[in-house]
Image (cartoon, rainbow, N blue to C red):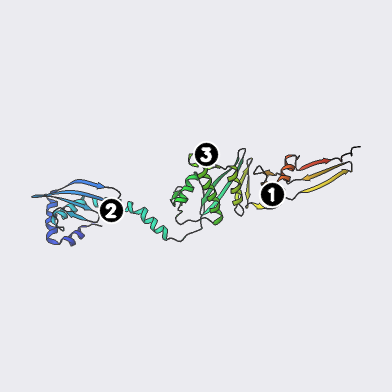
């Protein structure tokens, strides 16, 4: 930081005294200021018998006499100190340096997995939608999913208000969480999601194929699922068969097969690959999907009854 003591030490007592006399005789005036992203300097005109141009910046003094340290340079620097220009320069340079400094420091910080991701699925008439919350101790709603994913990709900081800033430079999600975010990023890229409305950007609609991939990625990831106004806390998608109970009754002339389905069975995809049953989100094996689909479509409550009559052989 430029100070009077520094000027006195650089110039020596004799030159400093001459420059101080020029300054106190009001022979220095500001001519021009140059401020951009590269530099911040002020040009002064020093009129002491001869006219000289002196450039003063936060770290350098240059005089057109070519002989700094000189009395003209000292006089201009004292003017910059007196008017507060030097302090403004240093503040401006600090603001310019802050982002680069933060990037440099952030690249040296150890990666942390303290950040959490909480997905939320919503089943609507049009299909599945997804919302996200992220945070450390407290979770914050991602109000614009495409913008969040863009910041994650470009390693740009995203502010969630006074309580939390997302720094992708050193904040890391888990492997499974990253897999989900990669699917959403690909979905945004393919569908041009930057043009979404505010509502759709916050709770993003999922095309059918993307919905299947998202559900596949949620095995082992807890999430919430809202269906018809009811919210379920789901501990990940589970791959398993659906327990089905069958009862045969009737006579040889007419048999009735009754199948009992889980209560509140709800398909999450049209092919019944993913369903909600008894509060669990299940991925059914391929051989069971068509059976469950047929039974559910013709069910009455929890049961589906199908009657069979033997054919009479033709004469």
- Mark 3 packing: few (<14 Cα in 10 Å), some, or many (20+)? few
The residue that disc 3 covers is 199
- Asked if labels 3 and 1 touch by Cβ distance under 8 angstroms, the answer is no
Q: Which of marks 1 and 3 is in front?
A: 1
**Quarter of the image that includes the C terminus:** top right
Q: Residue 90, labelled with which disc?
A: 2
Cα distance in 3D space between marks 1 and 2: 68 Å
- Above or below for 300 versus 134: above
What's the residue at 71%, 45% (across, down)? 290
- Asked if labels 2 and 1 touch by Cβ distance under 8 angstroms, the answer is no
Chain-order first, disc 3 or disc 2: 2
- Residue 129 image position (x, y, % from top left): 58, 43
The residue that disc 1 covers is 286
Chain-order first, disc 1 or disc 3: 3
Chain-order first, disc 1 or disc 2: 2
- Mark 2 packing: few (<14 Cα in 10 Å), some, or many (20+)? some
What's the residue at 11%, 60% (across, down)? 14
Q: Nearer the viewer, mark 1 or mark 2?
A: 1
Badge 3 marks a residue whose secondary structure is helix
Nearer-the-camera pick, 146 or 229: 146
Any part of residue 84 in sight = no
């Amino acid at each position: 930081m430029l100070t009077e003591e520094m000027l006195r030490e650089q110039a020596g007592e004799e030159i400093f005294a001459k420059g101080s006399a020029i300054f106190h005789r009001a022979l220095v005036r500001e001519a021009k200021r140059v401020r951009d992203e590269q530099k911040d300097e002020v040009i002064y005109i020093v009129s002491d018998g001869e006219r000289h141009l002196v450039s003063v910046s936060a770290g350098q003094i240059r005089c057109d006499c070519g002989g700094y340290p000189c009395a003209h340079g000292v006089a201009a620097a004292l003017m910059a100190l007196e008017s507060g220009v030097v302090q403004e320069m240093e503040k401006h340079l600090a603001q310019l340096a802050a982002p680069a400094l933060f990037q440099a420091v952030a690249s040296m910080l150890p990666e942390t997995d303290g950040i959490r991701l909480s997905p939320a699925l919503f089943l609507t008439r049009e299909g599945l939608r997804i919302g996200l919350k992220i945070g450390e101790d407290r979770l914050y709603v991602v109000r614009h999913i495409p913008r969040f994913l863009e910041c994650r990709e470009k390693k740009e900081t995203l502010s969630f208000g006074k309580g939390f800033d997302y720094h992708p430079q050193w904040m890391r999600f888990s492997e499974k969480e990253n897999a989900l975010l990669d699917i959403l990023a690909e979905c945004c890229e393919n569908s041009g999601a930057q043009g979404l409305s505010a509502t759709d950007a916050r709770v993003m609609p999922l095309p059918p194929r993307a919905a299947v991939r998202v559900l596949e990625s949620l095995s082992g990831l807890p999430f919430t699922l809202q269906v018809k106004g009811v919210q379920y806390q789901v501990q990940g998608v589970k791959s398993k068969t659906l327990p089905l109970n069958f009862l045969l009754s009737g006579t040889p002339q007419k048999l009735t097969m009754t199948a009992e389905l889980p209560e509140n069975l709800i398909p999450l995809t049209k092919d019944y690959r993913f369903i909600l049953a008894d509060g669990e989100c299940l991925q059914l094996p391929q051989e069971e999907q068509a059976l469950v689909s047929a039974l559910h479509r013709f069910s009455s409550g929890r049961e589906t009854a199908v009657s069979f009559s033997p054919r009479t052989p033709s004469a």
